[in-house]
Image (cartoon, helix red, strand yellow):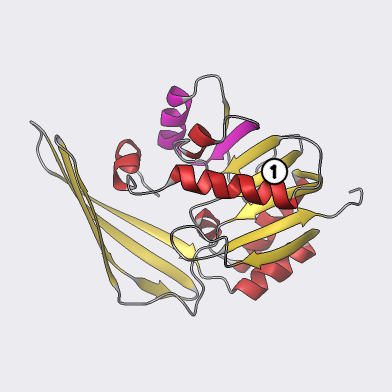
Amino acid sequence: MYKGLAKYYDLIYSWKDYRGEAEKVRALIAKYKQSDGNSLLEVACGTGKHLQYLRDGFQYTGLDLNDGMLKIARKRFPSTRFEKGNMINFNLGKKFDIIICLFSSIGYVKTRDNLRKTLDNFSRHLKPGGICIIEPWLTPASYKVGKAHMTVYDGNDIKIARLNVSKAKGGISILEMHHLIAEKNKKIRYIVTREELGLFDTQETLKLMEGAGLDAKFLRKNEFDRGRGILVGVRRQFPD
């Protein structure tokens, strides 16, 4: 995912309200977290943009699978710990008070079995009373096959147009992204990427969270700007 596009990622998503999302994350932590510490793991941290607004008050660790994204994040925040890992099976050897997985990145696990493994892994990395905050991807009912999408970035020296038409197969959404990138004094680049994200029913995800030892709920009122709601799970207070 985003192969060859890490350097353009923050431009493509320049519309994204990282500050507002971080404030909502802080509010959820304050309301639901029961453990005493402030260690925070961001799974699928990307280029580290949320960290910009989560540095104060938390001991932050970032995890991502994309080398290009991690390179940018480490350059942006050289004193912060960033690890490369897959959310399905990473092992950091410690437990956290908070795990966040935002921007629908949970969909990249693709299958129900991988979702179960991922939620089990999140739970294993949480202290009792710790909180897990997940922004889900679309559900099978809300995903619209055949819908056309376009994102545009119009900078002074860089122009980007990204288009795709939504597809699906076997419970997996398929996003074939066509990018046109024009940079000052360079040839126009055309890059095609393919992203596949699993379409998970909300109630099924909640059951898997409960099975992983998390007291789980779905919060529609705390949704971010994409209208997908927020999943919150609190690690039950019992020893492993």
Res. 122 visible in picture: no
Q: Is residue 2 magenta?
A: no
Q: Residue at x 35, y 39 (%)?
A: 6
Where's residue 135, x and y in %?
Answer: 55, 57
Where's residue 130, x and y in %?
Answer: 77, 46
Name the amino acid type tagged 1.
Ile
- Looking at the image, residue 49 lies above or below residue 209: above
Q: Residue at x 69, y 68 (%)?
A: 206
Where's residue 164, x and y in %?
Answer: 27, 64
Q: Residue at x 64, y 67 (%)?
A: 218
**Farthest right residue in view:** 239
Horizontal side of 149 relative to 60 (left or right) equals left
Q: Which residue is mark 1?
A: 98
Q: Residue at x 50, y 39 (%)?
A: 50
Magenta-tinted stretch: 58-76
Where's residue 217, x and y in %?
Answer: 70, 65
